[in-house]
Image (tube, grey):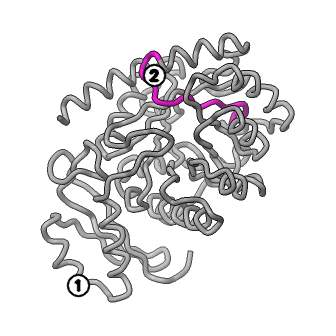
């Protein structure tokens, strides 16, 4: 990153105060952070009422960023792909892979996959995310032909279900959009396939940009950050800017911090504690923590027994204003979300 000073606002003291990004989560203070290169120059917590006075203490070159990020944190998010962000949305995971870390091989036939998708919608999922390539750590590369063979027949059989496509390949994106998918979810943030950025812009489809350090084959090889929360923010901001420059509407972009993608346990925990900072990007936030390794590291639970930990992380995300939860266990998550909503209201 450049040596130019940068400013960040992290909403905090959740539970009371102002609505966060127009949702049900509320906050009444912010942490003001500035850094110059890798050096944190200022880190202070302030009540919302004090912010106008704080702005006057900033260097003139930082004040426009302060105003822009402050407005983004408070502004409601417009719907994307029919999703209403005034309340949380649950996105069901439909892996059509033999080797995904949690459910590989479970949807081996078209019939099994279709039944699972319908069950997710019946349980309250707003969207079903279909994927034909595992991106777990050390996952082998999947050819384009193989990925298309996995997802094509299922996409064609789910024309009555709201779908997103979880892929890094432009040709798979095209196949899914032609079949009626509403959203592209790319763990590489449209960097893996040189044709992906132009395709999404040309098709005017919404997209999820996820942060990852490295590729699935290398991402857990000693990842390093100056400050993981600020570095992820900066990287996502740069990807948003690149997408907008390529013709993608900023109002159609969702961001994902990429828990577990090129991060240690300490990195993941720091990101989860500071999730609210990402509202300064002005985009809805998707959180994917379902059954992930960090739950096992913290609790000792094997993959099949990580639902309680998954729900704990999901509810933590909701408390920081996350708008989309990408999960394996739709029914249990929807129940937890509805109870959480009741408490907020």
- Give the number of callouts: 2
Which numbered disc, 2 or 1, marks the residue closer to the eye? Answer: 2
Q: Can residue 336 be seen at all in this image of the molecule?
A: yes
Q: Which residue is mark 2?
A: 330
> Can you identify the residue that label 1 sits on?
57
Can the viewer see residue 222? no
Quarter of the figure that contains the C terminus: top left
Closer to the camera in the image, 268 or 163: 163
Residue 63 is situated, as x and y percent measured from the top left of the image, at 32, 81
Disc 2 and disc 1: Cα gap in Å?
A: 47 Å
| The quarter of the displayed image where residue 154 is located | top right
* Residue 174 shown in magenta: no
**Residue occupying the point 51% across, 14% down:** 119
Say whether marks 2 and 1 touch (CB < 8 Å).
Answer: no
Left or right for 78, reference 171: left
Q: Is residue 254 left or right of residue 323?
A: right
- Location of residue 291 in the rendering, given as x and y in whole percent from the top left corner: 50, 28
Label 2 element class: helix
The quarter holding residue 277 reads bottom left
Q: Which region is colored magenta? A: 122-134
Which residue sits at x=75%, y=45%? 169
């Amino acid at each position: 990153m450049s040596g130019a000073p940068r400013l960040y606002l992290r909403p905090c003291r959740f539970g009371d105060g102002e609505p966060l990004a127009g949702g049900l989560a509320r906050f009444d203070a912010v942490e003001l952070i500035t850094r110059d290169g890798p050096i944190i120059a200022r880190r202070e917590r302030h009540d919302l009422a004090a912010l106008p006075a704080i702005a006057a203490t900033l260097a003139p070159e930082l004040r426009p960023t302060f105003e822009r990020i402050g407005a983004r944190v408070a502004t409601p998010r417009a719907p994307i792909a029919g999703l209403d962000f005034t309340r949380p949305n649950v996105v069901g995971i439909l892996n059509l892979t033999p080797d995904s870390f949690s459910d590989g091989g479970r949807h081996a036939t078209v019939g099994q996959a279709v039944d699972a998708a319908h069950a997710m919608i019946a349980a309250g999922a707003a969207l079903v995310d279909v994927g034909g390539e595992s991106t777990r750590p050390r996952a082998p590369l999947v050819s384009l032909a193989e990925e298309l063979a996995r997802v094509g027949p299922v996409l064609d059989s789910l024309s009555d279900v709201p779908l997103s496509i979880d892929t890094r390949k432009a040709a798979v994106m095209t196949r899914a959009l032609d079949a009626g998918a509403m959203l592209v979810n790319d763990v590489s943030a449209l960097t893996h396939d040189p044709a992906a950025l132009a395709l999404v812009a040309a098709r005017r489809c919404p997209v999820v940009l996820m942060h990852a350090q490295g590729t699935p084959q290398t991402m857990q090889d000693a990842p390093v950050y100056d400050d993981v929360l600020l570095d992820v923010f900066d990287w996502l901001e740069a990807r948003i800017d690149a997408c907008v420059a390529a013709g993608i509407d900023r109002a159609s972009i969702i961001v994902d911090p990429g828990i577990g993608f090129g991060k240690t346990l300490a990195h993941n925990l720091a990101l989860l504690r500071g999730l609210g900072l990402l509202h300064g990007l002005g985009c809805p936030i998707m959180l994917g923590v379902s059954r992930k390794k960090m739950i096992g590291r913290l609790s000792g639970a094997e993959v099949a027994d990580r639902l309680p930990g998954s729900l704990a992380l999901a509810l933590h995300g909701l408390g920081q204003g996350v708008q989309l939860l990408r999960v394996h266990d739709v029914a249990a998550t929807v129940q937890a979300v509805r109870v959480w909503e009741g408490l907020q209201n």
